[in-house]
Image (cartoon, rainbow, N blue to C red):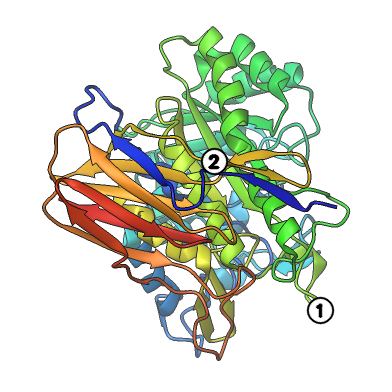
Amino acid sequence: MVAFLCFGLAAGAQVQVRIHETAKDQPVIPADIYGQFSEHLGRCIYEGIWVGPDSSIPNEDGYRTDVLNALRELKVPVMRWPGGCFADDYHWMDGIGPMSERPKILNSNWGGTLEDNSFGTHEFLNLCEKLGIEPYISGNVGSGTVEEMSKWIEYMTAQSGSMAELRQKNGRQEPWHVKFFGIGNEAWGCGGNMTADYYADVYKRYVTYCHDYTGNTLYKIASGASDYDYNWTKTLMQKAGKQMAGISLHYYTVLNWEDKGSAINFTDEEYYNIVAKSVEIDQVLKNHEAIMDAYDPQRRVGLLLDEWGTWFNVEPGTNPGHLFQQNSMRDAMVAAMCLNIFNGHTSRLKMANIAQVVNVLQSMILTDGPKMILTPTYHVFRMYNVHQNATFVPTEYKAGEIVSANGRIMSDLSISTSSKDGKFHVSIANPSLDKAQKITLNFDELKPSSVSGEILKSKKITDHNEFDKAPAVAPVAFNGYKLAKGTITVEVPAASVIVLKIR
Ligand code: AHR
């Protein structure tokens, strides 16, 4: 049986890439598509971010120092919290006031783990302030009331009134700045098992009482579809499109929910199957965008991919409810190719939040008690942060194709360019496991005078970073390019991710 097929250019042929830096009126890539998601799930919040001020793990006011520093480096633009499914089980008043008096609840979505509520509204919003991250709060529709949601917004953002007084009594004088507010999560599933029609009415009722206080303007987000559920987007846009600033979408790379496969032990065939499934997001986005265009041709309503990433079986011996998975060079390839895709969708796509930032699914960071490692996915996000708030530059090229064993067709090259402050950044991903590619970058008019770059690549595609070992996957300086006569020729190794800086 053929595991996968590649239809590329003849051996030795060069891929001609044309970068249209003279193209006018191109969108700015919103930093928020490089966003993160933090959920009260497994060891994401507790141990992953929050260890408490009395912990022996070095911390700043209870936030672990190593993770804070890694997040600073990443330039996280926005972070979603407290869920996920947890959000529709979360009652925010449990998470304010003296920590010793906060109720202990069972996290029934995620392994029945005891949740002591020591990380609540103050702890999350103060973290965002500390790191300059835009907070994205996910409100409880499934098991909460309109009054509860409305008072939460007042507590966080009002200058005066009894909710502001309660906040002040709990130690925070001034309101926080909160921009993004989600009205429920996965309303079709763990957020209440509603139909699209029913949720559209519920959404309108809840959103009516999500008020703007003290000059704080909320960007109100409706709970959107999963994957290929285009009817959900259509119904919401039709019935409630005028009352929302944005609608969400969730897309996880999973091939079989019964057995999602291992994060680190996989065959080449499984590698291609996963990467091909992940880049299918391109078509899924196009389909949702086309529906939104029909109801909102001005593109006022944003599409927010507020959960995405790979989802594999949990690591052997870990709590099945905690969704802890390792992260390999395959995950890095998924991240690189998806981020290149997102850069091209930003006339509608305004945010994306990979799930989740620490210790859950396709994480940036893994911890083991006091130890911490950066994942291959982290390195891609760090290398790609140059695209945040840069101007999109259309980039044309004709690549070959890879047909995965599960019948998906993907390009054997993925390239995206942006410009900022007189510099161009070109991110290049070569998903082929055995074919290096030679590419030539040509600009419309620019005659580049300098190039530098970084590359992420490992010996084996299953390589991953482990505690107490030297990193197997980490970026290094890249010098596999030649600058001559105004063009740049780049040797792109198989299974590598490169970001070039060009002037
Ligand atoms: O990311 C894990 C879960 O996946 C989230 O809590 C939920 O929204 C989604 O189903």
467 vs 429, left or right, is: right
* Amino acid type, callout 1: Gly
Considering only vertical position in the picture, is 261 above or below 164?
below
Q: Amino acid at mark 2?
A: Gly
x and y, in percent, of residue 438 in the image: 40, 53
Examine the rendering and report whether any part of residue 64 can be seen.
no
**Pointer 1 residue:** 317
Q: Residue at x 51, y 21 (%)?
A: 244
Q: Is residue 36 above or below residue 106?
A: above
The residue beneath circle 2 is 400
**Residue drawn 14% across the image and 47% down it:** 485
Task: Give the mark nearer the N terminus: 2 vs 1.
Answer: 1
Neighbor class of circle 2 (other Cα within 10 Å; few <14, some 14-19, many 20+) is some
Q: Give me the residue at 58% from left, 52% from top.
A: 82
> Are the two marked residues, 2 and 1, in contact with CB atoms closer than 8 angstroms?
no
Neighbour tally class for label 1: few under 14, some 14-19, many 20 plus, Cα within 10 Å: few
Residue 205 placement: quadrant: top right
Classify mark 1: helix, strand or loop.
loop
- Along the line of sight, the residue nearer the viewer: 203 or 399: 399
